[in-house]
Image (cartoon, rainbow, N blue to C red):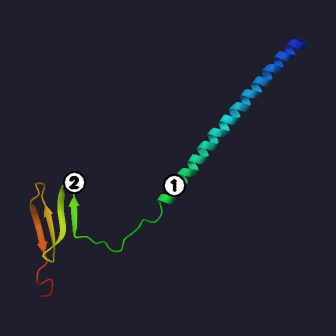
Amino acid sequence: MELTDANYNTLLARVRKLELQTRLWQIVGLLALSTLGFSRTANLMAQQVGQAAPLRATTVEAQDFLLKDTSGAVMGQLTVRDGKPALELYDASGKVTWSTTTRGIAAGR
């Protein structure tokens, strides 16, 4: 088979087209890989920031503490009544099932 100018020009055009397509796919692949790498790095940085030591309070102050179930119903309460602490536990209907208050004996009286 003899290579003529027409065949040579056609072959040269096809090679240029293939080189252009290859270069385009290389750029697309590089961009996709870079995007994946940067997003993974951002994820890892966010996880490291989120894993910082939690803030722990040494003192918690309140007048009432409520114990609630998953539906939000109050099942218990720790409060101060008449200057004395009281703990009450409730049933599902809201009635007190167990209660305690400090007594003079426990307070040393």
- Contact (CB < 8 A) between labels 2 and 1? no
Position of 5 with respect to 87 (left or right) is right
Estimate the x, y position of residue 4 in percent, counting from the top left.
Answer: 90, 12
| Above or below 53: residue 35 | above
Name the residue carrying label 1.
46
Name the residue carrying label 2.
72
Estimate the x, y position of residue 7 in percent, counting from the top left.
Answer: 85, 13
Identify the residue shown where x is 13% and y is 55%: 92
Position of the C terminus, as image quadrant, is bottom left
Identify the residue shown where x is 57% and y is 46%: 39
| Above or below 101: residue 26 | above
| Above or below 35: residue 18 | above
Q: How busy is the neighbourhood of tag 2: few (under 14 within 10 Å), some, or many (20 plus)?
A: few
Number of callouts: 2
Position of the N terminus, as image quadrant, is top right
Q: Amino acid at mark 2?
A: Gly
